[in-house]
Image (cartoon, grey):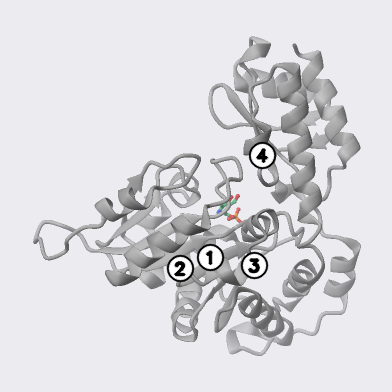
Amino acid sequence: MIDLRSDTVTKPTQAMRDAMAVAEVGDDVYGEDPTVIRLQELAAKMLGKEAGLFVVSGTMGNQVAIMTHTQRGDELITEAESHIFYYEVGDIAALSGVQARQVPGKRGIMDPDDVNHAIRDSSNIHFPRTSLIALENTHNRGGGKVWPIEYVREIAGIAHERGIAVHMDGARIFNASVASGIAPDVWASYADSVMFCLSKGLCAPVGSMLVGSRDFIDRARKNRKRLGGGLRQAGILAAAGIVALETMVDRLAEDHANAKLLADELARLGYGSDPAEAETNMAMVDVSVSGKDALSFVQLVKEKGVLCNAVTPTTVRLVTHHDVTTQQCREAVQAFKSLL
Ligand SMILES: Cc1ncc(COP(=O)(O)O)c(C=O)c1O
């Protein structure tokens, strides 16, 4: 099968498996796992922050960040289609007791004016306190859209002037960085905390990182423990994360080229897809031309050997990654062609 459902399906590389086999470990709840410590220091350095924290998943990283930045009853501003709002099982309410102020964006990008208007005046007795603004870069439901950096700068300026923290859900921050040529620490400089995933395009089997100031990470570590995320000999996993950060970032450009190829070829066949919008490792494809809705299309194309996900009633999402080759992308195009 040609698996274009997500970059989360990537398997660890041989170099990762080798590093895992010989990883030095210790009890990380005691702060004694040398490999976890090394990964956390590397992550913090790459993102230009004081400290890092290894967490089991992107969801845990986002939620630990939200729990650390907010108090119960606060309001969090987030884009209406953001992962934090859309796909994290209502965690912001269930775990942190926070409500979401959803700002609709264009492909996940919020207009700074809209964000500004959404901030509450907490001197009004009726209003919750806006304590956090979350930005998703790249934006998943926005088809891997990279934020315009000037919007990030502007929103961060508005937030910080009003004492509001900024969290970046940078699950795919390295895709944003490779596509834009803007270094990860420059993106991160506008945010008080950044979560990014080791287990997506970077191919590590498990894990994400949360980075921020030393004080923030100390408090986040306690919240991670509260959520049951205090790990023991986690160096086994961290070893793969180090290989991911040291060797798997630059090659993301190949995934981006493959996504562009898919968007291009499918547009040529008459599918609704805009190559200019395939900025990173995703192509969003409107399959209406096939006469099928997206869910039926996914079933039919599966019979031709291609896996993908429906993300709206008419759109499927194709995600490129290390474990699909350019040749397989061309074969996927042929499978789509056969359904016209
Ligand atoms: C933008 C974004 N944030 C967070 C996550 C959550 O990551 P995880 O699946 O590791 O919990 C994802 C997962 O796809 C994502 O796309």
Q: Which mark is residue 183?
A: 3
Mark 2 and mark 4: span between their CA atoms? 29 Å
Q: Which residue is mark 1?
A: 61
The single residue placed furthest to the front in the displayed view is: 150
Work out whether mark 3 precedes mark 2 in sequence or the reverse, and give the earlier one. Answer: 2
Relative image position of residue 269 (x, y in whole percent): 75, 18
Is residue 319 something one can see in this rendering? yes
Residue on which the image places disc 4: 278
Question: Is the residue 158 above or below the residue 306 in the image?
Answer: below
Q: Decide: marks 2, 1 in contact (CB < 8 A)?
A: yes
Q: Under 8 Å from ligand 1: the CB of mark 2? A: no
- Residue 334: give x, y in percent of width and height: 84, 22
Residue occupying the point 63% across, 63% down: 182
Find out if the beta carbon at label 1 lies less than 8 Å from the nearest ligand 1 atom: yes
Mark 2 or 4: the one toward you? 4
Question: Label 1's element?
Answer: helix
